[in-house]
Amino acid sequence: MNQGLLYPNLDENRSSGPIRTILDVIVVLLVVAAVIAVAASAPSNTYAYAQLQQIGAVVGTIESGNWLLPRDHGGGLARKPQLYAWLDAPILIATGIYDDFNFRLPTVVATFIAALMVYFLGRRWYDRRTGLMAACLWVTIRHMGKLSYIAVTDMLMTVWIIGAIMCADRLLFHRAPRDKRRRWAIGLWVMMILGAMTKGWGVLNLILVGGMLALAVAVWPGFKALRLAEDSGGGLGLTLRLLGRRWWRAIKATRFGWGILAMVVVLAPVCIGMFIQGGEEFREIIHYEFVSRVTGGGENAPHSSSVPAVVHLMYYALPVSIFMIGALLLTKVRLWFSRRGPICLPLCWMLAVVVPFSLTHGFRPDYLLPCYAPAALMGAWAVGEIVRRGRSGGITTQILRHVFAAVPVVIGILLILLPMIYLFHDYMPGFITKNIKMPSSVPSVTWRVLCGLIALGAVVLALSVRWSLQWRLRRVAAVAVVGMLGIIFIDRHMFTRHARTGDGEKMIAFARDVKGRIGGDEFAVFRAGKLATELYLGRFGAWPEPPGTPDRKRWDVQTLNRSDVRWLVTNDCGLIGLGATEIISQDGNKIEVMKPGDLGVVEVRTAPVISQKWGRAYLIRLRRPIRVRGKPRATEHESGRQDKW
């Protein structure tokens, strides 16, 4: 093996026994569990982002039995590949529990696995302590408070990308013994196939993983042979020939031909079946996902970002991005892309993610999740390098020591100030209360935690200053990790829009109460936008077709009342869609008001849903005609008969 060519600290890995490894793994798992616990105990955000589409596809898979191309809760075809649904649907079937945790369980498990991968990759590229620090820094990035507990495919995709790079590393850079390389090649293409079934149908992970490997293979060995070449006139030709030989060796080492063949064998039948089953609707989805997101073409193209992707990375990867910048400053520029430098592989990895997404139209910050791992690896190495250089490391080392120490210092100050702002919000100046809003409701346990965070902030502040003066930068980084748990708590429980509005909790409470009232009766949901209560109900009534037309959009009050559906779950926007409105005149002005009473008995179960502007959510018992010999005679209301609640 050619380990040790990159970094001189690998002897520490060999001297570390299994007990140290087990302890490291326990620490990593505990930090991940803490982040997950903070996010899971925060107000629900299931109704936001793309979660309703993903969860709806999972529930649709269960309800319809269609595991190839299910429809989501809105009746549309699933927009992503099926692996998330294949993992989550058996969990819902086995438990029968439709709640936020089970909806997000694939992401939760993926977060634990990804953290361990970062740890072992850090051990291989650097040393044991760097791997441990990188894993802890990675999971306590502020953005991870959201991404580690969300029902979308991003974290699952990140696991397969990290796993693929780990396997490729054993084939190309830190090569495994010859008799073990075949298993690493198999692992590489298993990861690629799983990534293709998670997101992007193989195009996305081939670009990201392939781009990282192509760049690293090209630059990592260096170009000393070219500089020694006497024929300066053929420099470009020699360079191209050298790169071609390197890429060809990498193609053979990774079994690229066999891997692509395996992907085609697995994915082609699935894709053909979906095209046959989905028809034109599925083709429109493919056009949106691949053409509109990249070029911005089409009527419903996603919005483009006005901020460069690298700026998003610096912001959303805080505080790791500060340590990452330190790694760039500690390494000579000529060694950035050299095997003699410590940051070549993670830097190539980051560029392979940031550059492609910078060129796309429909960029979102969540897409950068796969490059948080190399940023954490670079940052953890930079902390260890400051310790290694010590007080004689020069002006750059001296400045970065203060910058790195400032990270937990700022975290400690925020842990003191932010809870105090919320605790004494009514007494704060107007410019503070205007910009920092109080949540709709705060449990008593949250207030107690906020009080505890003030004490934690004082401890973080004192220890970070003390250990910085003693040049114990690893301890300083550890204090930053602990402090970030508090920052994530404040962000998830108090600062986010979901905490401020409490809309997720309103929907959960509504669904819990409605499910008990409906019982086993058939019900329908006339959705408007993203009504999420049906996901928590966990089952769908058969939505009847309007008489004489298959178009669901032509439903109105009259046709709904003539149907066999007994219950309706909807909101104000849904009632408008059904035509349950009237125009009244007030002071000469026409005002449109709701008439849910036209549909039957109404119970209002929630306060207004602020974020989505849906108004109130309703449970409505529909009027049903009383049939005599199969013919409608009168409604229950008209005949004076009313079923009891």
Image (cartoon, rainbow, N blue to C red):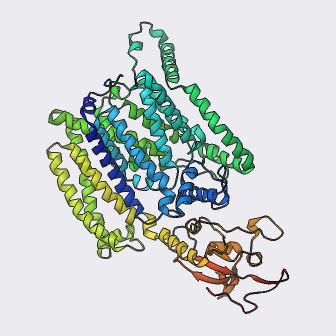
Looking at the image, the residue that sits furthest to the top is 230
What percent of the width, then of the height, locates residue 311?
A: 42, 45
Q: Is residue 493 visible?
A: yes
What percent of the width, then of the height, locates residue 297?
A: 65, 46
* Quadrant position of the N terminus in the picture: top left
Residue at position x 35%, y 42% from top? 376
Instruction: Say above or below: 230 vs 576.
Output: above
Residue at position x 57%, y 74% from top? 515
Which residue is nearer to you in this view: 399 or 586?
Answer: 399
What percent of the width, then of the height, locates residue 342?
A: 32, 30
Residue at position x 56%, y 38% from top? 193
* Quadrant position of the C terminus in the picture: bottom right
Instruction: Say above or below: 330 vs 482.
Output: above
Q: Is residue 56 left or right of residue 141?
A: right
Q: On the image, which quarter does residue 163 sit in? A: top left
Looking at the image, the residue that sits furthest to the bottom is 640
Q: On the image, which quarter does residue 619 sit in? A: bottom right
What percent of the width, then of the height, locates residue 460?
A: 22, 56
Instruction: Say above or below: 590 vs 508.
Output: below
Which residue is nearer to you in this view: 632 or 492?
Answer: 632
